[in-house]
Image (spheres, rainbow, N blue to C red):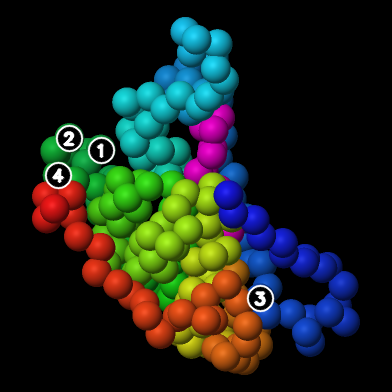
Amino acid sequence: MGGVAVLLSNKKHDKAKAKYQLRYLCRTHMGSDDQAYQSVFQQSDDAGHVGVSLSRSLLHVAGNALKTNITELGPRVLPFSELVLYGWSMIHRKIWTTKKEIYVPNFKKAFEHFCIHAGGRAVIDAVEERLRLSKEDGEASRMTLYRFGNTSSSSVWYELSYLEAKGRVKRGDRVWQIAFGSGFKCNSAVWECISELDPNKQNAWSDRIHLYPVHIPDAADH
């Protein structure tokens, strides 16, 4: 079980001490759809034991939630050139009823770092594929999953700590945290680094960051 505490402030005098500034927060709730609502559900089994049931449609539901979320977030963070390309692909498909795939915006033009909910290897793979991210973009998520397992919503903070310990986050960099939850929910938080971060400052990765990243073999390799 993971746990993270984050101190947020809306006081101007705290800006000098803050590491990040929250730029955007986008929350998508799919609870009105029965399939989405039941994709992650707490219930009792035949023996009366209470547990969490994950449906086979979970990845499909998560994909739809992410699509809805980035449709709202995109216009706020993407450069104009990417919005034009996306808009044109939508118009082209609408007018000519073509089966050509809709253009997926290049979110690397909006963010330097990505913290993907480490709910499982399949979740990270699916988000990387949908957003056309590289393995390096998902490194913090994979290493967090490898070391700590599924720590639920706190995983995105372990991932941010990983990036800090690696010395990758610089002043002015933008970080996109993407998290999922029952309901079904997809949340995006966009942070801008507003201070010079010391990679040697103590955090959850400090004692072993030099050991990462590690190679994580596929199941087929065993």
Give me the residue at 13% from left, 53% from top.
Answer: 222
Image vertical order of residue 62 relative to residue 8, above or below: above
Give the mark nearer the N terminus: 2 vs 3: 3
Disc 3 residue type (three-letter): Tyr
Image vertical order of residue 96 relative to residue 34, above or below: below
- The residue at which mark 2 appears reads as 97
- Please give the label number shown on residue 94: 1
Q: How many other residues sit within 10 Å of disc 4, few (<14), some (14-19) or many (≥20)? A: few
Magenta residues span 180-189
Give the mark nearer the N terminus: 1 vs 3: 3
Give the mark nearer the N terminus: 4 vs 1: 1
Q: Position of residue 21 (x, y in %)?
A: 68, 73
Q: How many other residues sit within 10 Å of disc 3, few (<14), some (14-19) or many (≥20)? A: some
Local SS, label 2: loop
Q: Given contact means CB atoms under 8 Å apart, are the residues at marks 1 and 2 in contact? A: yes
Question: Rounded to the nearest whole Å, what is the CA distance between mark 4 and mark 3?
Answer: 39 Å
Queried whether the magenta region covers residue 119, the answer comes back as no
- The residue at which mark 4 appears reads as 100
Give the mark nearer the N terminus: 4 vs 3: 3
Local SS, label 3: strand
Question: Rounded to the nearest whole Å, what is the CA distance between mark 1 and mark 2?
Answer: 5 Å
Q: Position of residue 1 (x, y in %)?
A: 58, 49
Image vertical order of residue 144 relative to residue 73, above or below: below
- The residue at which mark 3 appears reads as 20
The answer to whether any part of residue 127 appears in the image is no
For residue 82, side relative to residue 100 (left or right): right
Question: Rounded to the nearest whole Å, what is the CA distance between mark 2 and mark 4?
Answer: 9 Å
Q: Nearer the viewer, mark 4 or mark 1?
A: 4
Q: Nearer the viewer, mark 4 or mark 3?
A: 3
